[in-house]
Structures are given as C-alpha cells and as structure tokens.
Image (cartoon, helix red, strand yellow):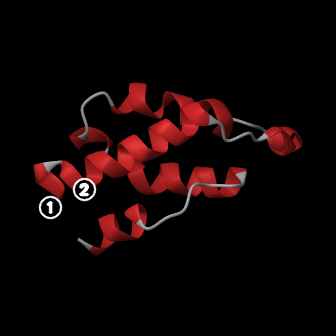
Amino acid sequence: GDKIKAIVDLPAPTTLKEANEFLGKINWYRKFIPNFARIAEPLHKVTNKTKHHRHEFRWGPDQQQSFDEFKRLLTTYPLFL
C-alpha cells in the first residue's frame, strides 16, 4: 500500500529525528515481522539518546543493514503486498 511505499522511498536517516520517525513508521508492523526486536536493535542503539546527547547520533553499517532489512521485509512479506 501507500504507507509501505512511503517507508521504502525514505532515504537513510541522517539525524536522530529522522531515525526516530523511521522507527515510528515501522513500529506498527512489529507484530507481523518475525524477529522485529532483533532487527531493530541497531536502530534503538542510536535512537535512545537524550536531548543532551542527540549530537552523538551516528548512523553506521549496522544501522544501515537494519534499515535495509526492514525495507526488504516490507516489500517481500506476503502480508504487506
């Protein structure tokens, strides 16, 4: 649907706000995606910053892999197509 297309079209986050927005968007699918928590763990590692530490946001290979995996699951999982 349109919601999934909107998620798939998102570029990789470059700020803490964008990373949190991505997590917010995919969180609805949590109950449908096996191992959601495990896949999301690298994203949570960089998004659980307090306001005073948001400048420490770092998007690395682990986060990119998680981001790409969620996009792949959302476009290949039969439930969402």
Closer to us: 49 or 5 = 5
Residue lying at 29% horizontally and 74% vertically, measured from the top left: 2
Count residues near mark 1 (Cα–Cα under 10 Å), then give few for <14, some for 14-19, many for 20+: few
* Residue where numbered disc 1 is placed: 81
Q: Secondary structure at mark 2?
A: helix
Q: Secondary structure at mark 1?
A: loop
Task: Tell which circle, 1 or 2, labels the residue nearer the N-terminal end.
Answer: 2
Residue 42 x, y percent position in the rendering: 55, 30
Amino acid under disc 2: Thr
Q: Which mark is residue 54?
A: none
Residue lying at 40% horizontally and 70% vertically, measured from the top left: 6
Mark 1–mark 2 contact, CB under 8 Å? yes
* Residue where numbered disc 2 is placed: 75
Residue 10 x, y percent position in the rendering: 49, 64
Q: Is residue 38 left or right of residue 31?
A: right
- Above or below residue 36? Residue 55 is below
The quadrant in which residue 48 appears is top right
Amino acid under disc 1: Leu
Is there any visible trace of residue 29 in the rendered image?
yes
**The N terminus: image quadrant:** bottom left
